[in-house]
Amino acid sequence: MRVVIVTESFPPDVNGVAHCALQTARHLVDRGHAPLVVAPATAAGHGPDALAPCPVVRVPSLPLPGYPQVRVALPSRRVAAAITEHRADIVHLASPFILGVRGMAAAARLGVPAVAVYQTDLAGYARTYVGAGEATAWRRIRSVHAAADRTLAPSSAALHDLEAHGVPRVRLWPRGVDTVRFRPEHRDEALRRELAPNGELIVGYVGRLAPEKQVELLAGACGLEGVRVVIVGDGPSETSLREALPGAVFLGRRTGDELARIFASLDVFAHTGPFETFCQTVQEAMASGVPVVAPAAGGPLDLVAHGRTGLLVPPRDEAAVRDAVGALAADPALRAAYGAAGRPTVEGRTWAAVGDQLIDHYADVLTARTVVAA
């Protein structure tokens, strides 16, 4: 198949949309298909995409006001031209919102089937950033996804939300995890001594430092005796979080094998954001053999078995996060049991396995189009 992946973000960006788009392109190449990526230009311009396994067409973009790490694509004819010139059999829209909307319109105009992948809780972001606008966000989501031949939701909660808001033709498609890179054997005692020189229990958060992630909910955990909170990531909230989380260690953005070493060296992984449609970092922690504390909302509901691989807590509840971390800190045997139980639950969720599921979705859509045409 010849596939054009129109994505709102792509490496060197570090986020779930960019990572999923990259893994999708890699898998398509591995299976003998021919992908092409269309993505916003980076801040550095149109330099070579060293990580990409296939050609990448960059569309002019501007930084999002107040959040320069996020680039917003500008109107461009390159999307339709890329679909035409690549002779696409199918268009894959990764978290369509701005660039993806143009990709959907171009696919419809050219008669090319489209699969839209839902990845970002735009309604939740509207609540966080403007205190309103949820209904408007859902109208935009519905209008974009209703035009697609199929929408793929990453979790049961996301699928339910989409269907409840009138999005048709929704199917479940989870995310993969690199179980070779993320594994318990990468635990590093030297790194642990560096992060917690007095032998503290290490509680880690990995992700963007932005308002919707609500990382400040770890403040209570920072106050627990014998606990060291470690924050991995960057974003617009970093300055305020350094004030809100006294004693926490901020490591900045880390990737690849270095990130895997950090994950495996944690005693507890704590996620705080209530708007996750999937929550990739929870899977990476589980693959690393680390027990998880996460909100009982969105993607973590599918990933964390409460009382078996970790603890689910009420969203936006600092005291609940503190108490869950405290319970695990006080019980080494429980931490070990949760960590050991977590790894087997994700071992079958490799990117190859979920990539093959995606190709099956493509094939279903193409078959349906053929039947309609006949």
Image (cartoon, helix red, strand yellow):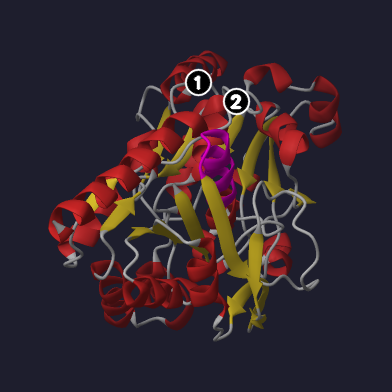
Query: Are circles 1 and 2 on residues that touch, CB within 8 Å?
Result: yes
Task: Decide which of 177, 104 is in the foreground and name it.
Answer: 104
Q: Residues within 10 Å of mark 2 (few under 14, many from 20)?
A: many
Residue corresponding to mark 2: 288
- Residue 39 sits in quarter: bottom right
CA gap, disc 1 and disc 2: 7 Å
Answer whether residue 176 is magenta in the image: no
Q: Earlier in the sequence, mark 1 or mark 2?
A: 2
> Is 246 above or below relative to 31?
below
> Is 204 above or below relative to 79?
above
Q: Residue at x 60, y 25 (%)?
A: 288
User: Residue 298, how many percent across, how many down?
Assistant: 35, 50
Q: Residues within 10 Å of mark 1 (few under 14, many from 20)?
A: many
Residue 198: tell me if it is visible.
Answer: no
Please state the extent of the stretch shown in magenta in the rendering: 20-33
Prevalent SS, magenta region: helix
Task: Decide which of 57, 308 is in the foreground and name it.
Answer: 57
User: Residue 2, how many percent across, how many down?
Assistant: 47, 52
Task: Decide which of 306, 56 is in the foreground and name it.
Answer: 56
Q: Residue at x 58, y 84 (%)?
A: 74
On residue 343, the disc is: 1
User: Residue 192, how many percent across, how many down?
Assistant: 79, 28
> Is 344 above or below relative to 133?
above
